[in-house]
Image (cartoon, grey):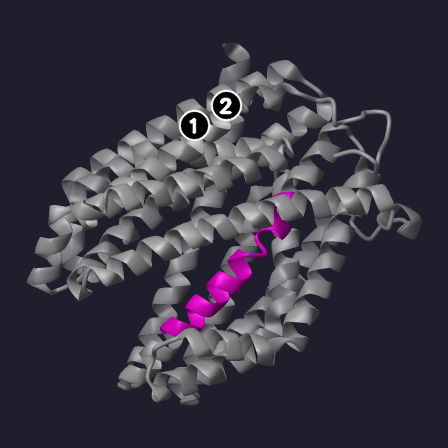
Amino acid sequence: MIQTDATTRRLYHLAGPIILANLATPLLGMVDTAVIGQLGQTHLLGALALGAMIFNLVFWGFGFLRMGTTALVAQAKGRADPAAIRDHLSRSLLLAVVLGVLLCLLQQPIANLIFSTTGASSGVEDAAATYYRIRIWGAPLHLMLLAMMGYLLGQQASRYVLILQLILNLTNIILDLVFVVLLNWSVEGVAAATLIAEAVTLIAGFWILARHFNFFSGAFDPAQIFALKAIKALFRVNRDIMIRTLCLIFAFAWFTDQGARLGDLSLAANLILMQFVTFSAFFIDGFAIASESIMGEAHGKRDRLATDDIIRAAFISGGLLAFVLSLAFFFLSPLIMRLLTSSPAVINEATQFSLWMVATPFVSFAAYIYDGLFIGATKTEEMRTAMIVSLFVFLAAWWLTQSLENHGLWLALMIYYVARAASLWVYQQRLYDFSDHDAKTTEQTL
């Protein structure tokens, strides 16, 4: 029990800065919206929303660069292998550059595919295309930042992740004000601000790596960085995480689309309620990400007791937080809804389904925590399989509950969260399996 208490303190110490960094992200979106809103042109707001959605979907799909790097670095840290730590980041950064350059080279086919599926007006699409053409050049920068933040989390240095997030947001906000408010650059200014802010943040990140982690000290060994087994391990982990992420994107896109098919009022009500769901995810995900790092270190040490402690601490902490969030939503949601929309019809509609939103933190927290634990242990094949199964369960639940309309849609979402947790619980004993971790090797291990 004493050991578990110590693990819980570590978990909170790591999770705090991660949660603050997560909460800083929507603040930037609010500022982007506010500066464009001051221009008084509705189609520009639509273009900003469309452009942001495009990049959220594209970059979310490459989230494996953060998650995979966290797990591999944390395990190397557990083995006390600084050479492997540096090599893992080097590989992830190189992969980020390659993928980012490919996105830049393929930007026109990607744009044609995306804009052919949108139903926005020509004015919105034209402005969104301008935003896209500028911001896409930052793809290598954004993906490198994902890898860098994965490294910092794997090193259990979450305070530096918060620092980088603050640098990114403050730089972006200042440039928003200069480019849009002072220079009247419209959506071009917002895109340019994001591009420059990512470059500034990446430079700051490399300075942190050099100053606090001695990343550039010593000679890099290309033979180790490009070792075939290490490359295969990296691609296996990233492949599984990417498939898992694409299933997750599809599930929530399906939820949104089916809400839209129920009518504008249902779509608007679900949008309001999903703000609460997203907010709770920012908090619970902080503990899940912290769990990745501690679990990865435990696996690097091949320490069964430490593995047991982080599983227990993560579920207790995540469950308590989820309970508090559900309680807060129950009492505060009526007030917050009135702040989010002035439409009585939307508020009344959202209120009819608000109990689903209230239940979501407590129903979903186990799925988030399990994701963090399985990523840290690099049991990504199990996580991928569980997510595919859960997606089919979600679609089956939606099909069976269509007669309940929006209540059925929310019920299917709850079943989806439960299925994600249950399908990973089936594999829980694999978290104690260290057979794929050979402590005698360096780059051939996970």
Q: Is residue 56 magenta?
A: yes
Residue depicted at 49% across the width and 17% down the height: 5
What residue type is disc 1 on? Ala
Residue depicted at 67% across the width and 42% down the height: 237
Q: Are marks 1 and 2 in contact (CB under 8 Å)?
A: yes
Instruction: Examine the rendering and report whether any part of residue 293 can be seen.
Output: no
Q: Is label 2 in a helix, a strand or a loop?
A: loop
- On screen, 363 above or below 340? above
- On screen, 353 above or below 310? below
Left or right of 254: which side holds 285?
A: right
What residue type is disc 2 on? Val
- Rounded to the nearest angstrom, the CA distance separating label 1 from label 2 is 6 Å
In-front residue for pair 364/38: 364
Q: Give the prevailing secondary structure in the magenta stretch.
A: helix
**Percent of width and height locating residue 41:** 28, 86
Magenta region, residue range:
49-69
**Quarter residue 347 falls in:** bottom left
Spot the residue most to the top. Answer: 1
Q: Is residue 109 magenta?
A: no
Residue identified by numbered label 1: 422
Residue identified by numbered label 2: 426
**Percent of width and height locating residue 272:** 23, 56
**Quarter residue 328 falls in:** top left
In-front residue for pair 167/232: 232
